[in-house]
Image: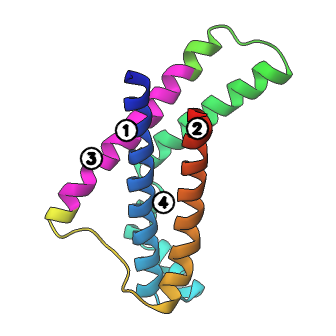
Amino acid sequence: MLYNFVLIVFTAAFIFRTVKTLFFHIFLWQLKEFRPDRIIAHLKTDYGKKLLVNPLNIIKWILFIVIYSISLININLVEVPFSFHIIIYSFYLFWFIWLIETISIPFAVLRLRFKYPVPTVKSFSVLEPTLNKIFIDVINQSHNRQV
């Protein structure tokens, strides 16, 4: 029972956070008129650099690298002492950060700081296949666990 609740919470956090990020990136793409040179110029500004290199992103990347590198070392080379604990705590911390980012979404919507793309053919052509892929994978994973 608790496992199912936790699974639903983490799945919802993943979906909401991913959709929010996808909406923001499509919004940014529209704002820069779908031109790669303008997006690259934007990423060279201070605000653009903050988008790529903020503390939460750095922490998540470090945790991601720790989880997978220790797993690969354990599988292929030699067992790292306390590797199970390192992997599990890194995994929990990674998802805790995702949950915190997900909790911030309603506050962004209420403060009118939530960026979403203008519905156009171009934005829909990016949004629809991406959301399809996310939801199909999540639904398949949850269905496979129930069977």
Identify the residue at horizontal 46%, vertical 76% (top origin): 26
Which kind of residue does numbered mark 1 sit on? Val
Cα distance in 3D space between marks 3 and 2:
21 Å
Residue 22, image x, y percentages: 46, 67
Question: In the picture, which quadrant includes the C terminus?
Answer: top right
| Numbered mark located on residue 52 in the image | 4
Residue at image point 59% right, 84% down? 36
Badge nearest the viewer, 1 or 4: 1
Residue neighbourhood size for the residue with mark 1, other residues' Cα within 10 Å, grouped as few (<14), some (14–19), many (≥20):
few
Disc on res. 123: none
Comparing marks 1 and 2, which lies closer to the viewer? Answer: 1
13 over 121 or under it: above or below:
above
The mark found on residue 64 in the picture is 2
Magenta-tinted stretch: 88-108
Q: Which mark is residue 103?
A: 3
Q: What element carries label 4?
A: helix
The image quarter in which residue 118 lies: bottom left
Residue at label 1?
A: 9
Whether 90 is among the magenta residues is yes
User: Closer to the observer: label 3 or label 2?
Assistant: 3
- Cα–Cα gap, marks 3 and 4: 21 Å
